[in-house]
Image: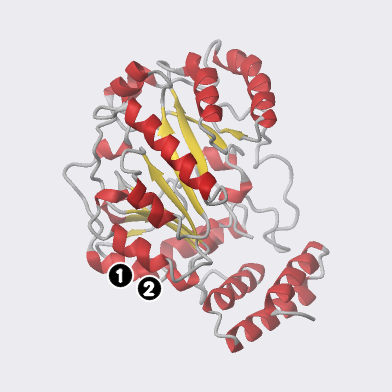
Amino acid sequence: MGSYKDIYESALKEWGKQNYDKSIEFLEESMRLAGISNDTFFVNKSLNEIEIKKKKTNLVSMPRVIHVTLTSRCNMKCPFCYLDRYAGIWDMPEEVCEEITGLFPYLQHLTWQGGEAFLHPSFRKMILRTIDFPNIRQTLLTNGSFLDEGWLDLFLRIPKFTIVISLESAKKDTYEALRKGGNFDRLKKNLFLINSLSQDNGNKFNLLVNIIIMKRNYLEVEEMIDFAIENKFNHIILTPLYANGSEFYDKEYLPPDGEGVREYFSRLMPRMTEKTKMNNVYLDDRFTGIGKEDASSGTHGDCSATLDEAICLSPWQQLFIESTGEVKSYCSCVHSLGNLKDSSIKEIWNGRLLGQLRENILNYDYHSCNPICVGGLLDKSNLRME
C-alpha cells in the first residue's frame, strides 16, 4: 500500500469519498507504521485525525499548532496595540518555554510573536531547538526592526519560514507617527536584505504583510498594496482595527459597513485583486469580506455525521498563548481556556473549558465564537489543519 505517509493521504481521500470506516482503518495503519519508524510527528498527526473523525472531546493526541506570545516587550509603542491593555512587562516564564519546547516533536506549525519575540531572552535558544524538527512550519510576527543578517541567517536554517510584518502606511511620516519608535527607512532596508538573502537561497522566505485599516489610512490602501508588491510580499492581509479600549480606537475605528466605506472598497477591491493576481500575490480581505461567504449560512445537515462542515477544528488542533499567559484555541477566540500561571499546557488541552468548546462545535453551536470566524472572514485554512 506504500509508506505510512502514502497511507495517511489515502485515508483522507477515502474520507472525502465518505468511506469513513476505511478511512479510519487507513489512519490506524498509518499510525502503527509511523510508530514502528519512531516518527513521533506522524503518529500524533494520524492519531489527531482519528480522534477528530471519531469526534472525541478528550484527546490523547497533542496540539499540532502552537501560537506563542513570548513577551509584551517591544521597541515601539503603537497606539492601536492590544498590549496597551496590560500594565507592566510580561515575559513567558522559563518553565513554560521548556513545556513548549517539549511539544516540538508533535508540531506542524509554530507561530512566534510579542511585543517583539526578539526581546525575550530564550527566543534564540528556542529557535535553535526547532531546527531539530524539520516538520515544523514557522511564522514570525514582527515589526521588522530586528531582522538583521544574523537573525535571517538563523531563519534560513528552518525549512519553511514565514515573516509577517505589520504596516499601516507606505508614507514615512504617517508610518512613524503611528508606530512610535519606528523607522521607515530601516524597515525598507531590512526588506531589501530579506529579499536579497531569500533570493540567494532559492526564495526561502515567505513574506506576508498585515495592513490594519483605520480612518487615518484607508484612502492609502492602494499605495500600501503597491508597496507590498514592490517589496516582494507574497501575501497581503487587510484587517480592521481591533478594540483595545483606547481613545485611539474610539477615534480611528473605521466600520467596514460604514457610510461610504463599503462602497469605496467595493470599487477598489476588484482592481486590487486583479493587480495582486498579476503579480502572484495573494490578497486576503478580512476587512470588508467582499466576495466571502458567511460560514454560518446554509444548513449543516446531520451533526451526528462528521465534522467536515464545521467552521472550525482549532479546539482539536491548536492553542494560542496570549501575553499574561492566557490560553485560547485560536487568536480570534473570545473566551480564555485557562492561564499558564495556574495550569500546564497539557492540563488546559484536556481541561473542562476546551472540552466544552469541542462539544459546542460538535453540535454546531457557535454562540461563544467570534463573528470574524463565523462570518467567514477567515480562510478555512486558518481554522483547520490538513
x and y percent of residue 333 in the render?
45, 47
Observer-nearest of 294 and 136: 136
14 to the left or right of 199 = right
Q: What type is the residue that disc 1 sits on?
A: Glu
Type of the residue with mark 2: Gly
Q: Are marks 2 and 1 in contact (CB under 8 Å)?
A: yes
User: Residue drawn at (35%, 22%), measured in percent from left and top?
Assistant: 175
Q: Nearer the viewer, residue 85 or 220?
A: 220
Q: Residue furthest bottom?
A: 36
Q: Which quarter of the picture shows residue 263?
A: top right
Residue under label 1 = 98
Q: How is the image coloured?
A: secondary structure
Rendered position, 7 above or below 300: below
Neighbor class of circle 1 (other Cα within 10 Å; few <14, some 14-19, many 20+) is few
Regarding residue 332, the answer to whether it shows in the image is no
Q: Residue at x 44, y 71 (%)?
A: 132
> Which residue is labeled 2 in the image?
102
Residue at image location 52% in from the left, 48% down from the top = 200
Please state, as top left, top right, bottom left or bottom right, where the N terminus lies in the image.
Answer: bottom right
Q: Residue 53 vs residue 324: left or right?
A: right
Locate the C terminus by quadrant.
Answer: bottom right
